[in-house]
Amino acid sequence: MFSNTNLAASRVVSNRLIIIINGDLGMSPGLMAAQVSHVSELVGFNAAMTINDPTVTLGDKSTIDVLEYEYWRLNPITIIKKAPSATLVRFIQEFQTQKIKYELFRDFVPPQIPENTLTCLAIYPGQLVSKEINELGLA
Protein backbone atom coordinates (compact mmCIF):
# COMPACT_ATOMS: atom_id res chain seq x y z
CA MET A 1 0.00 0.00 0.00
CA PHE A 2 1.07 3.56 -0.50
CA SER A 3 2.02 5.49 2.59
CA ASN A 4 1.10 8.98 1.44
CA THR A 5 -2.65 9.01 2.04
CA ASN A 6 -2.76 12.78 1.43
CA LEU A 7 -1.77 12.18 -2.19
CA ALA A 8 -4.62 9.72 -2.70
CA ALA A 9 -7.09 11.99 -0.89
CA SER A 10 -6.15 15.01 -3.02
CA ARG A 11 -7.27 13.37 -6.26
CA VAL A 12 -10.50 14.71 -7.69
CA VAL A 13 -11.49 11.34 -9.13
CA SER A 14 -10.00 8.21 -7.65
CA ASN A 15 -10.43 4.58 -8.69
CA ARG A 16 -12.89 5.33 -11.49
CA LEU A 17 -12.61 5.01 -15.23
CA ILE A 18 -14.25 8.02 -16.88
CA ILE A 19 -15.49 7.62 -20.44
CA ILE A 20 -16.72 10.61 -22.40
CA ILE A 21 -18.90 9.90 -25.44
CA ASN A 22 -18.95 12.21 -28.46
CA GLY A 23 -22.42 13.71 -28.09
CA ASP A 24 -22.46 15.22 -31.59
CA LEU A 25 -22.81 11.83 -33.29
CA GLY A 26 -26.32 10.99 -32.12
CA MET A 27 -25.36 7.38 -31.42
CA SER A 28 -28.04 4.93 -30.36
CA PRO A 29 -27.73 3.42 -26.86
CA GLY A 30 -26.45 0.18 -28.40
CA LEU A 31 -23.77 1.93 -30.44
CA MET A 32 -22.71 3.98 -27.40
CA ALA A 33 -22.43 0.74 -25.40
CA ALA A 34 -20.19 -0.73 -28.09
CA GLN A 35 -17.91 2.32 -28.06
CA VAL A 36 -17.71 2.23 -24.25
CA SER A 37 -16.82 -1.46 -24.43
CA HIS A 38 -14.09 -0.88 -27.02
CA VAL A 39 -12.37 1.93 -25.12
CA SER A 40 -12.70 0.11 -21.75
CA GLU A 41 -10.99 -2.92 -23.24
CA LEU A 42 -8.22 -0.69 -24.61
CA VAL A 43 -7.62 0.88 -21.18
CA GLY A 44 -7.61 -2.47 -19.41
CA PHE A 45 -5.26 -4.06 -21.94
CA ASN A 46 -2.78 -1.16 -22.00
CA ALA A 47 -2.74 -0.78 -18.20
CA ALA A 48 -2.21 -4.51 -17.69
CA MET A 49 0.57 -4.57 -20.29
CA THR A 50 2.37 -1.67 -18.60
CA ILE A 51 2.04 -3.18 -15.13
CA ASN A 52 3.23 -6.62 -16.26
CA ASP A 53 5.90 -5.49 -18.74
CA PRO A 54 9.27 -6.79 -17.49
CA THR A 55 11.10 -4.16 -19.57
CA VAL A 56 9.43 -1.31 -17.64
CA THR A 57 11.40 -0.70 -14.47
CA LEU A 58 9.66 -0.09 -11.17
CA GLY A 59 10.87 3.52 -11.20
CA ASP A 60 8.87 4.08 -14.40
CA LYS A 61 5.68 2.75 -12.87
CA SER A 62 3.89 5.03 -10.48
CA THR A 63 2.99 2.98 -7.41
CA ILE A 64 -0.23 4.90 -6.95
CA ASP A 65 -1.25 4.34 -10.60
CA VAL A 66 -0.65 0.59 -10.27
CA LEU A 67 -2.69 0.43 -7.07
CA GLU A 68 -5.52 2.50 -8.53
CA TYR A 69 -5.65 0.38 -11.67
CA GLU A 70 -5.69 -2.82 -9.61
CA TYR A 71 -8.45 -1.43 -7.38
CA TRP A 72 -10.48 -0.46 -10.47
CA ARG A 73 -9.91 -3.89 -12.02
CA LEU A 74 -11.31 -5.55 -8.90
CA ASN A 75 -14.10 -2.95 -8.42
CA PRO A 76 -14.80 -1.70 -11.94
CA ILE A 77 -16.66 1.55 -11.35
CA THR A 78 -17.02 3.42 -14.61
CA ILE A 79 -18.64 6.79 -15.18
CA ILE A 80 -19.99 7.49 -18.66
CA LYS A 81 -20.51 11.10 -19.68
CA LYS A 82 -21.31 12.94 -22.90
CA ALA A 83 -19.77 16.07 -24.48
CA PRO A 84 -19.65 17.75 -27.92
CA SER A 85 -16.71 16.86 -30.17
CA ALA A 86 -15.16 20.34 -29.81
CA THR A 87 -15.06 19.82 -26.04
CA LEU A 88 -13.43 16.40 -26.51
CA VAL A 89 -10.71 17.98 -28.67
CA ARG A 90 -10.11 20.65 -26.02
CA PHE A 91 -9.92 18.00 -23.29
CA ILE A 92 -7.35 16.04 -25.33
CA GLN A 93 -5.15 19.15 -25.59
CA GLU A 94 -5.46 19.71 -21.82
CA PHE A 95 -4.67 16.06 -21.08
CA GLN A 96 -1.51 16.22 -23.18
CA THR A 97 -0.37 19.40 -21.40
CA GLN A 98 -1.19 18.06 -17.93
CA LYS A 99 0.13 14.54 -18.65
CA ILE A 100 -3.21 12.91 -17.83
CA LYS A 101 -3.40 9.29 -19.00
CA TYR A 102 -6.18 8.73 -21.50
CA GLU A 103 -7.15 6.64 -24.52
CA LEU A 104 -9.02 7.68 -27.64
CA PHE A 105 -11.30 5.47 -29.66
CA ARG A 106 -12.06 6.18 -33.30
CA ASP A 107 -14.49 4.09 -35.26
CA PHE A 108 -16.23 3.68 -38.59
CA VAL A 109 -19.85 2.58 -38.56
CA PRO A 110 -21.42 3.32 -41.94
CA PRO A 111 -23.54 5.24 -42.60
CA GLN A 112 -23.86 6.84 -39.14
CA ILE A 113 -20.19 7.37 -38.24
CA PRO A 114 -17.67 8.42 -40.92
CA GLU A 115 -14.28 6.71 -41.03
CA ASN A 116 -11.76 7.67 -38.31
CA THR A 117 -14.31 9.60 -36.23
CA LEU A 118 -13.52 10.19 -32.57
CA THR A 119 -16.38 8.39 -30.82
CA CYS A 120 -15.16 8.51 -27.21
CA LEU A 121 -12.23 8.93 -24.89
CA ALA A 122 -11.38 7.30 -21.59
CA ILE A 123 -9.48 8.77 -18.66
CA TYR A 124 -7.54 6.18 -16.68
CA PRO A 125 -8.52 5.54 -13.05
CA GLY A 126 -6.84 7.81 -10.52
CA GLN A 127 -6.16 10.75 -12.82
CA LEU A 128 -6.77 14.31 -11.71
CA VAL A 129 -9.64 15.73 -13.73
CA SER A 130 -11.09 19.20 -13.95
CA LYS A 131 -14.30 20.25 -12.31
CA GLU A 132 -15.73 20.70 -15.82
CA ILE A 133 -15.40 16.97 -16.52
CA ASN A 134 -17.07 16.10 -13.22
CA GLU A 135 -19.96 18.40 -14.12
CA LEU A 136 -20.61 16.91 -17.58
CA GLY A 137 -23.98 15.22 -18.00
CA LEU A 138 -24.24 11.47 -17.86
CA ALA A 139 -24.66 9.67 -21.19
Image (spheres, rainbow, N blue to C red):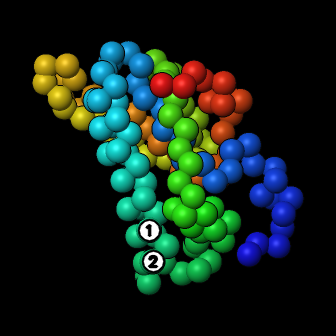
Q: Is residue 45 above or below residue 90?
A: below
- Quadrant housing the N terminus: bottom right
Left or right of 61 in this view: 111: left
Q: Is residue 61 above or below residue 109?
A: below
- Quarter assignment of residue 111: top left
* Amino acid type for the residue under numbered disc 1: Ala
Q: Residue shown at 68%/50% (left/top)?
A: 14
Residue at the limit of the structure toward the right, as seen here: 6
Q: Is residue 28 above or below residue 104?
A: above
Q: Could you tell me if residue 71 is visible in this image?
A: yes
Which residue is more in the foreground, 89 or 128? 128
Q: Residue shown at 42%/19% (left/top)?
A: 23
* Location of mark 1 (residue): 48
Q: Residue shown at 54%/25% (left/top)?
A: 138
Which residue is more in the foreground, 125 or 58? 125
Q: Secondary structure at mark 1?
A: helix
- Residue 117 x/y as whole percent: 27, 28
Q: Could you tell me if residue 90 is visible in this image?
A: no
* Amino acid type for the residue under numbered disc 2: Asn
- Residue 66 x/y as whole percent: 59, 68
- Residue 137 x/y as whole percent: 57, 21
Alpha-carbon span between mark 1 and mark 2: 6 Å
Q: Secondary structure at mark 2?
A: helix
Callout 1–callout 2 Cβ contact below 8 Å: yes
Count of marks, rendered view: 2
- Quarter assignment of residue 28: top left
Left or right of 8 in this view: 63: left
Left or right of 5 in this view: 31: left
* Location of mark 2 (residue): 52
- Residue 18 x/y as whole percent: 54, 41
Left or right of 40 in this view: 92: right
